[in-house]
Amino acid sequence: MITELFDLRPIGAPLISALCAVGIMLLGHHSGWRIALSLAASALKFVVVWSMLPGALAGKVYFFSVGEILPGLEFAFRVDALGLFFGLVSSTLWVLTTIYAIAYMRGSHSLRRFFGFFALCVSTTQAIAFAENLLTLFIFYELLTICTYPLVVHSGTLEARRAGRRYLIYTLTGGAAILAGMILVYQATGSLSLSTPGLLEASIDERLLLLMFVLLISGFGVKAALMPLHAWLPTAMVAPTPFSALLHAVAVVKAGSFGLMRVIYNIFGVDLLATLGYHHVLAVIAAVTILVASLVALRQDVLKRRLAWSTISQLSYIVLAACLLTPLAALAAVIHIANQAFAKITLFFVAGAIEKTTGKKRISELDGIGRTMPWTMAAFTVACLSFMGVPLLAGFITKWYLSVGALAAGAPVYVGVMMASAILNAAYWLPVLYRAWFKPGEHPDAPPREAENLLLWPTLACAAYVIVLGVGAQAPAMPFALAQSAVSFAFGLEALTP
Amino acid sequence: MHLLPLTALLPITAGALAPALFYRRPDACWWWALAAMLANLIAVSILWFELHTGTTIRYPLGGWPAPYGIELVFDGVAALMLVLAALSVAIMIASRRYINATIPKGRRSLAYALVLINLGGMNGFVAAADLFNLFVFMEIFSITAYALVALARGPVAALAALKYLLVGAVSSLLVLLAVALLYAQTGSLNMADIAARLAAADAPGASALALGCLVVGFLVKAAIFPLHFWLPDAHASAPSPVSALLSGLVVKMGVVGLVRTRILFVEADVVPVVLLDQLLVWLGAIAVLAGAVLALVQRELKLMLAYSTVANMGYIAVGLGLATSAAVGGALAHTVYHAVIKTGLFLTAGSILLCTGLSRVDDLRGLGQRMPLTCGALVLGLLAATGIPTTAGFVGKWQIAVGALEAGQPWVVGVILAGSLLTLSWAIRVINSLFFRPPARARVIIADEAPASLLIPSVVLALLAIAGGLGGAVLLELVEPLTTRIVGQPS
């Protein structure tokens, strides 16, 4: 039973980060103010967002409307299960990333700009999660592009500017496609609300539906790095590591995946899409992306680039799972938002910590790093194993539900894709682990030299959470129940029993 | 209440007296001009509130009722006066420093006088209910505009002013010819009266010719492609506050003229306006793309902004031409919002020019470090100009796109999106140059933040531009009655 409640928290959460950004822009000359504001805002937001969890689990939907901005279109926020799930992930990771960024960015230039836009970027992500309608979502989706640009080109080098330009060309063109699709949807239905399990109706001309699907999916597909729209992602790695971590884990790419899920579950709806059959094509594209990106990742020697290609591959898990249109696969899609986020951000934190501590960027230089940085590499190992799908870790849960869902959808070929992907993941992560733990380094007897505490703790916290997600997914207060209610809403089920 | 004629007479009188009154102390003239602008703003605000509590305000000059006497009317079109009044105050605040720095002492009072007379002319133009006064006031604001462009010294400005003068004169002549044609057929000059009598005159050929002349005349004033060629040089070479005035406000008078023409001919119902609509859609669509591409290849900031005006006038033309209520509402909203955005952009570009003396985008590298607020305002304005959602520029584009689908012309949506992306691509170049590249010029390194009188108008307008989209529904509701009049009843 869903009850709607008028509440300030849906707009409060994005507003906290936005005000934090304004504060940093005004007072950020002093590092003290900058750090205090960032930490206080991220902690406050963490509390605000998590405080909505008990209510949401009890079936409450929090709602806040600012007012109409265009005829018939409200600027409104509504925290449903899917949105809150994404919101929880992003607000939790903001706290950890802020701590990490404070340590990592020490001594860099333009820190006021960096932390200001960092907070803005989180604010827009939160607003995307809580958007009540497609217009509100789109507003913040475009703002996210704009806010992330200064972070991508932070270093100001030619390489960074090139990457920034490519990033903008891809994402803004994608944005234009979404806008076009959105206008078509609005014209056809007179609404853009995301609060229904399926806004479009089967009575609409099928060619028009196809056009909407192509425009919306390709638009969101850019940020979700679906092949062949993925090329911006590996080059955007020039950004400072804390931001790359956030970009790859929650902010940008997940906004794309989240948008895709909104299009599939709330704009088209499961029933309509099943009769139209467009999801088969999208599933094939996602499966190809999973495999091809993994193959490319095998060939990368720079650690961050391997991570980038692995992200492309992992993101398509979400798309593939969403496209299978069975409840269990949908569950995999929702929880993979969290699973991929925590595991991937761990890997990025480790890559950054290694680079900051030892200056090493390439995998071939990592011989024996496990001896010098044992705790960091332990976190790395956990995340890698999770990606390979080792049971009791987060990644396994995704693969399990996705495979079961694929069988239920009558498409066992995707179980094969899961197996192949697990093997490929093993093929590009195990050599790194082997080098780190078993190959002797240049100075085998050198004492351990861990990364500094502020870099290490967030990393360990993320890795610990990967284990928690894998072991304790069914525990009562976990967001897992939230994912279940999101799925049962999309499929119109009373209760979902996995 | 005699406020309505006052809106035209007060600025014109104040302007005419200014050079004589301030012959010895030209710098004090700024206070005089600002006071006149503020008085005008108050008068217009009172009129505007009356319009929204009661009905249309009509004022017969000298007590002679229309159609025999001259009539001024404060209706939905004239409500644009509020935008004119408010923005001209902002321009006046910003122009003091600029005019003191760039214009020799002897001619400063002249500059203020011209701006005042220009404003009075525009006020009269939007309020005129008869064609002859429409023409007279058009000449008043046009001639002062030529003179204002020529205020900037230098060969480019002189040539631009001359070009502007010649083209403007031709367009004025066309409008005069149309006035004569309509008067010959109906014996009246009052627009409502003409609309009522034109059908009885039974001269479709002459009516069509009059319509054609009016449209071409106003297309020139509105700088709709391909009649835009006078605009970029004139707007870019004028002193920056004047650029803001011209690009933000004066060019909108062409739109007002088109709207008045369309209302007249929709009510008269003698010549089908479908052809006019199609023409506007096509020219507007080409203008959107051509303006954006031409802006893309410019190197000077002000030229980019001037070409962006060409593109934005294209959006307005498309909206008017689509003739559905959503699209026309969008065009009117865009008229208002583009005035805000472009005034702000030119004022900001002006303070950059004044503080650094540099105008090429490549020379402005790294200025974001030295003038963060001014450059920030410029960036916000540019984002609004591209029509990122919830900025002021988004409202018009969204409504026009929705209207295009209603009108069954979906290709227009593609044009609008392409125009926005092209605009973004040059906006990004400017943003990159300002914020993400190391300085290339010594003058950038020693530049300081602009003084408050330049900074405050820039920042306020930039914030309005970026948040304006949130008020989109309100604005569209305000222009709703006018939209219905322009679209007309489906016959």
Image (cartoon, grey):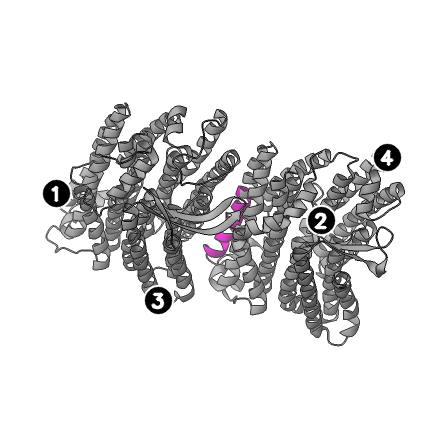
Query: In this view of the protein, which residue sits in the foreground, B87 or B64?
Result: B64
Q: Which residue is mark 4?
A: B203
Of callouts 1 and 3, the N-terminal one: 3
Q: Classify residue B457 as left or right of residue B68.
A: left
User: Considering only vertical position in the picture, is A294 above or below B478?
Assistant: above
Separation of residues labelled 1 and 3 (CA atoms): 44 Å
Circle 2 packing at 10 Å, graded few (<14), some (14-19), many (20+), is many
- Marks 4 & 1, CB-CB < 8 Å contact: no
Is B432 magenta? The answer is yes
Q: Which residue is mark 2?
A: B256
State the residue at coordinates (83%, 34%).
Answer: B204
Q: Which amino acid is tagged 4?
A: Ala
Furthest toward the bottom, the residue is B24
Q: Nearer the viewer, mark 3 or mark 4?
A: 4
Q: Which amino acid is tagged 1?
A: Phe
- Report if residue A13 is visible in the image: yes
Q: Which amino acid is tagged 2?
A: Val
Residue A33 shows which numbered tag? 3
Q: Nearer the viewer, mark 1 or mark 3?
A: 3
Q: Which amino acid is tagged 3?
A: Trp
Separation of residues labelled 2 and 3 (CA atoms): 51 Å
- Report if residue A315 is visible in the image: no
Residue stretch in magenta: B421-438
